[in-house]
Image (cartoon, grey):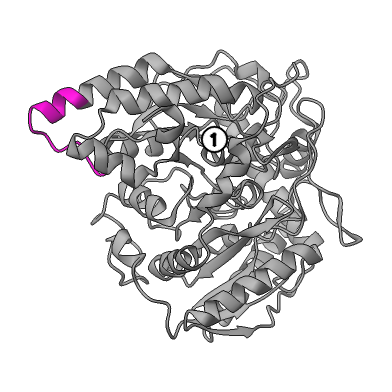
Amino acid sequence: MDQHDLGELSASETARQVRSGELRPIEVIDAAIARIEARNPSLNALVYTNFEHARQVALDLERRMASGEDIGTLAGVPTAMKDLFGEYPRWPATLGGIPMLRDRLAEATSLYPARMEHAGAIMIGTTNSPTLGFRGTCDNELFGPTRNPFDTDFNSGGSSGGSAAAVADGLLPVAGANDGGGSAGIEAAWCGVYGFQPSRGLIVGVAGAEGSGQLAPYTHESLVARTVEDAALVLGALTRAGQASVPESGASTDWLMQTRRPVTGMRIGLSMDLGIFPVDSRIAELVKQAAIVFETLGAHVKVIDFALPHSQQEISSMWCQLMGARMLATAEGLAQTGIDLLGDDNPLPAPVRRWIERARDMSLAEMHAASDMRASIRQTFEATFQDVDLVLAPTVGSFPVRNAARGQTLGPDDVEAEAVDPLIGWALSYLTNFTGHPVAFVPAGNWDDVPIGMQLIGGRGRDGDVLAASAAFELARPWISRYHIPRRRPLDRMPA
């Protein structure tokens, strides 16, 4: 196979061929390196690569295989972690392209690379992210925007935009996507890949998973992939099957088995706006068509009234406020190591600094109000899941936005003539960061070659239901053929 043929292989098939001896790990990695060298300059998906490390790990895998060692379920699969809270010793860790941190090197190994390597995957670099993950687009002052593989004039979405763009463009089959605000969903929708955000507590050991002071949005160790099967394999690696701890679930941690379950009889609640969000009519149309697919598969679909008691402006403002508190805590932690992110000579993006300052001045009454709002969102979800097994909704309300000058790309400020916060207010995908429910971000289709995404939200601990429904839809309406669109894109380099 040449580099392009290897780039078309799923993670599952790559690992199978490596384990059987049909492919050598070094062949897989060399092909991935060739694709990255050819395609990433025009995409800006990976912002750091360590090819020497990847080749050394590949050769070590070959030595271990030769000695009869089982090298894992993801044997030889190339992957990358997100440059936000992902860390690997002696690799740059800029927290989303903060210029002051350009020379900062990590000292420890974070969860994603540690568990992926344990399963035989090979870390090849880090992917782009907005500063501190604080916006739904992927752009920062240090590295600039990540371009959308389907049309490079537009943004990939964020905050895991580098990961999604790399997967959609065939640079990697899977990549990491930690998620504190729909950050496995926005870019999955805009780049046409599959994202998965597990139930809170499923992946044991996620730093900050409970949020800052139990108030900030839950952070999930998430992923993006081209196929549901690949996502299930990665989920198994991240949970280290048998060590998962979600008391509500009762489900097997054989995630591949979950993808083979039928959806016959599943109760799916369809909400085109989660009660409060404006959604482009073209996006709504494709999600409605997806609902019909589920009916043909034997599921029971009904339109539901998602009765959130707050407006989308109120909730997005609350998210910004609580994320401001988390960013303040991060800045204060770095200050103890001698790094002053809040000094006058180290300007952060204006929205980041503004919300950090607001968090610094947050009153006790404001904290209680935010906590009450968050509780009401959770109660709405729990009430909804009394009557349905899954909720089907659009992932985002808008099409991708054009890239702006370095560090300046924001989302839309209105959708269907309704004002939204350009940081996050146009995304429907961040509510589960307040509730901890599992959600899959599924390619629903394309509109004039532009990907459109939908989300399947499950009850707490019902990750298996989400995977089963995702896999059934993929089998009925496979999206893998749509990747021919980014494959034929021009390979002009990004402007400086």
Q: Residue at point 66% right, 48% down?
A: 190
Quadrant in the picture for the C terminus? top right
x and y percentages locating residue 110 in the rendered image: 40, 34
Q: Is residue 415 magenta?
A: no
Nearest the camera: 449 or 82? 449
Q: Which residue is mark 1?
A: 166
- Could you say whether the residue bearing mark 1 is in a helix, strand or loop? helix
Q: How many marks?
A: 1
x and y percentages locating residue 109 in the rendered image: 37, 29
Q: Residues within 10 Å of mark 1 (few under 14, many from 20)?
A: many
Is 407 rendered above or below residue 177? above
The answer to whether any part of residue 193 appears in the image is no
Is 90 rendered above or below residue 238? above
Q: Is residue 428 left or right of residue 209?
A: right
Quadrant in which residue 88 is drawn: top left
Q: Residue at point 71% right, 72% down?
A: 272
Is 215 rendered above or below residue 490? below
x and y percentages locating residue 455 in the rendered image: 59, 63
Nearest the camera: 469 or 102? 469
Quadrant in which residue 173 is drawn: top left
Nearest the camera: 50 or 475? 475
Farthest front residue in view: 1
Quadrant in the picture for the N terminus? top left
x and y percentages locating residue 362 in the rendered image: 74, 48
The kind of residue tagged 1 is Ala
Q: Residue at point 19% right, 36% down?
A: 71
Q: Residue at point 59% right, 60% down?
A: 434
Residue range highlighted in magenta: 62-73
Q: Is residue 72 magenta?
A: yes
The answer to whether any part of residue 254 appears in the image is yes
